[in-house]
Amino acid sequence: MEDKISCVCQEHYDNFLSCQKCFQRFYKAQMLKAENKKLIEEIEQRTNYLKKVLGRITAIEARMKMMSEHPHPKQQSTNIKQQAQGSEVDFMAKELPQCFFSICKDPELAMAFLLKCGAIPKSRKCDKCMTEYGAPEMRIENYGCLGYSFHCTNCNSRSNIKENTFWAKCQLNLDKILLFMFLWALGMKDSEIANLLDCSPTHIIHLSRRIRKLACKEFIKNLPKFNGVVEIDEQNFIQRKIEIGKGKAPQKWVLLMYERDTKLAYLEPLEKRSFEYILPIIQKRCEIGTVILTSRNGAYGRLEDYGYPHFTLEKFKGFENADNKEVHIRGTITLWLWAKHNIKAKNRSAIHLEEHLQEFLWRRQIRQRCRYKKLLESAEVLRNVLDLISKENQ
């Protein structure tokens, strides 16, 4: 009402729209009022920003004053060794909570956990300064958003704690690294892990593959030779669920081996489904005299001529021999169903198929040791991963 009185003349007060001059005055007054309101809000925002800047300047001045009053690092050279050991001892002696997720939430607790497990180095010597007693030990310090680093109090040099380790090119902080390993041990997809950690899926895929390679290397290293009664079969990983039309993807055949007594298993991709490619794998993985059960297929040739007793069955009639019920390949069929179920949930395109097959077998061994208890299995997988990374860092 007051705006109308100040802008509109008394003659056209009741109907100011009929007068063009009065309407223009009123319209301009409203525009100026809105602009004035925006300017006042902008002034308030800038005032608040200046207060924050002044607060930061005051904090920086206080830190600079404290640093100027602090003695020079060279004056404390006699206590360097004790301080370097003290920081490590503090982390190693730190009590960890029972809840694993509480450790993952706290960077300091995650640091202590990884130090105790050996996933990151416990100490490092400074390469830049040498004394008559050798290279001095560097101490662990926390630099906030930059993370933990080794700091030499003699030459004031710094080295990131992930440098020259398995995590050298990793972009994650230590607490997220620990959470990533736990989620990977649970068998989650790389895309799901990336969403939970709020980071690049490409980076998570790269980290997962590096850990997978360590697991594959460990599995092949400890894999014994097959003996006794062994079932062998070959299956196509790229296969349509219902045989309608023709799949465009190339076929990827996989050789399956399953030992009945020990339940030992082995899977390996085949370049070609032929005797020339299958025989070397059998000779490499099976001892002479191993009884081999297969389907009646020309790809197996005459294994009897190479020292392997060979029994066959008609696959299109069933997974066992009608004359001898002991001649069957049900073990390989079950193994293949579980392998496809686990691998295709995370890798439907069969990229790096051999690595995924060996990871499945590595997890299968751990599952058998844990007697198929899911929670215990995940904890055992995490423990094995930490051990493998600790060996890699040495």
Image (cartoon, grey):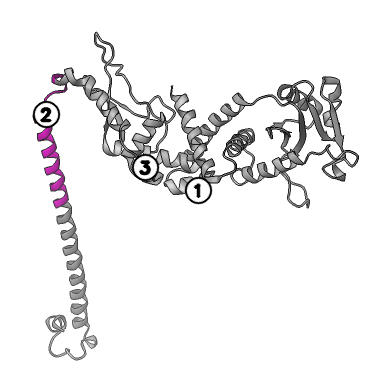
Q: Residue at x 66, y 25 (%)?
A: 224
Residue 9 placed where, x, y %?
13, 86
Task: Name the residue beneath numbered marker 1.
Answer: 192
Label 3, label 2: how far apart the Cα atoms are: 33 Å
Residue 293 placed where, x, y %?
81, 33
Task: Residue 173: tell me if it is visible.
Answer: no
Q: Is residue 286 toward the left or the right of residue 54 in the image?
A: right
Q: Residue at x 44, y 27 (%)?
A: 390
Residue 392 placed where, x, y %?
47, 25
3 or 1: mark nearer the eye: 3
Q: Secondary structure at mark 3?
A: helix
In this view of the protein, which residue sits in the foreground, 120 or 6?
Answer: 120
Q: Quadrant of the N terminus?
A: bottom left
Who comes first in sequence, dot 3 or dot 2? 2
The amino acid at mark 1 is Glu
Q: Is residue 23 above or below residue 96?
A: below
Task: Name the residue beneath numbered marker 2.
Answer: 70
Q: Which residues are magenta?
A: 51-75
The amino acid at mark 2 is His
User: Decide: marks 2, 1 in contact (CB < 8 A)?
Assistant: no
Residue 72 inside the magenta-drawn segment:
yes
